[in-house]
Amino acid sequence: MTKVVDVVDVVDVVDVVDVVDVSAAVLLRDGEEGVEFLLAQRPEGKVYSGYWEFPGGKVEPGETLREALVRELQEELGITVDRAWPWLSRRFIYPHATVRLKFFRVASWHGDISPIEHSGLVWTKIGDPASVSPILPANGPILRALELPSLYALTNAAGNGIVAELAKLEKALAGGLRLIQIRDKTLAPAERLRFARGVMALAKAHADARVLVNDDEQLAHKVGAHGLHLSSGRIKELTQRPAFDRVAVSCHNAGELSRAATLGLDFALLSPVLPTLTHPEAKGIGWDEFERLIEQSPLPVFALGGMQPEMFETAWKRGAHGIALMRGWG
């Protein structure tokens, strides 16, 4: 079993005086059974020798985070980065320093990977338990975030009809859709329950599919949903994370994103990014503001509002985990 050292193991050991900026790489490749990520083992002579981590290192004076990433991967692994997307940011207190990590998802590089500055390397399929241990504590939550698909589908049975929406979902699940939010809060309670049961029946045919119910804990428990999706108003009332495997939230500003992180939620939606069909009068915050708001987020954030299936690359470049769609996912 993988051991991820808890934060209490390393906090309060000594006074923290340094803040170290680090760029870390989540290298991704297509494996035989799915997408895999790389972990590297810290060598003898370094702090936390023998622990496993995502490769990367300290940002030198005058470097940007991306420049540091490129240099570190050349030095540590002998590869040159072709494409890297900014992703999560985490702040962690070790005995010797406070580390401010910026994780990048690296999907393309050239050169052969070699353990130039590590004791070992291991590739693991996303979703599988890590086969190595222990893993540095700041890296542990990244493993769970990696399990999230890039597409979050929001249902619209109220607009399309229950039968048509279930047929659309069945087709989408067969095509690889794996993350679904049962929205449809305007349906009558009995109709929403019937629809939710239908969604869960379809999802059960796919072991890795996950379904979250929007803002109704009782309904989520009743149908056996995997999680709960909260409104921005709900998180203001909460004092602790709801007891579901996956909990997400809709956010519209920096304060709500910060609150989601404090509650330890799994991911967030940030909207509206662009004008939508339902609210064409709303301009949206735009990609620049979206990028600014999520730059320091420790949670994966999906872009919502005016999204189209062809916008994945744009969203990834801006630091998004993926995009959320109410239309265009089926």
Image (spheres, grey):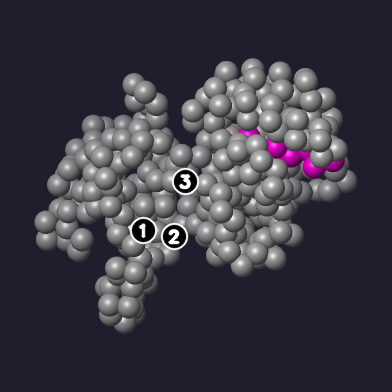
Q: In this view, does 328 lie to the left or right of 126?
A: right
Asked which secondary structure carries label 1, the reply is: loop
Q: Mark 3 points at which residue?
A: 145
| Residue that protrudes farthest toward the bottom in the picture | 15
Q: For mark 1, does the 10 Å Cα neighbourhood hold few (<14), some (14 to 19), or many (20 or more) residues?
A: many
Q: Which residue is situated farthest in the left direction here?
A: 44
Residue at point 36%, 52% (across, down): 140
Question: Does 224 appear above or below 54?
Answer: above
The residue identified by callout 1 is: 138
Q: In this view, does 60 lie to the left or right of 177?
A: left
Q: Can residue 256 be seen in this view?
A: yes
The quadrant of the picture occupied by the N terminus is: top left
Q: Is residue 295 above or below residue 20?
A: above
Answer with the quarter of the image where residue 90 lies.
bottom left
Quarter of the image where one finds residue 8: bottom left
Residue on which disc 2 sits: 90
How many labels, in total?
A: 3
Q: How far apart are marks 2 and 1 (CA)?
A: 7 Å
Amino acid on which the number 3 mark rests in the picture: Ala
**Quadrant including the C terminus:** top right
Q: Identify residue type, mark 1.
A: Ala
Tell me, yes or no, whether the two marked residues, 2 and 1, touch with CB atoms within 8 Å: yes
Q: Which residues are the magenta region?
A: 180-186
Q: Position of residue 10 (x, y in %)?
A: 30, 69
Q: Earlier in the sequence, mark 2 or mark 1?
A: 2
Going from the N terminus, do you reach mark 2 or mark 3 first?
A: 2
How much space separates mark 1 and mark 3, taking CA atoms?
13 Å
Q: Mark 2 and mark 3: span between their CA atoms? A: 12 Å
The spot of residue 197 in percent (x, y) is 68, 30
Q: Is residue 37 above or below residue 53?
A: above
> Along the polypeptide, which appears first: circle 1 or circle 3?
1
Depth order, front residue of 303/78: 303
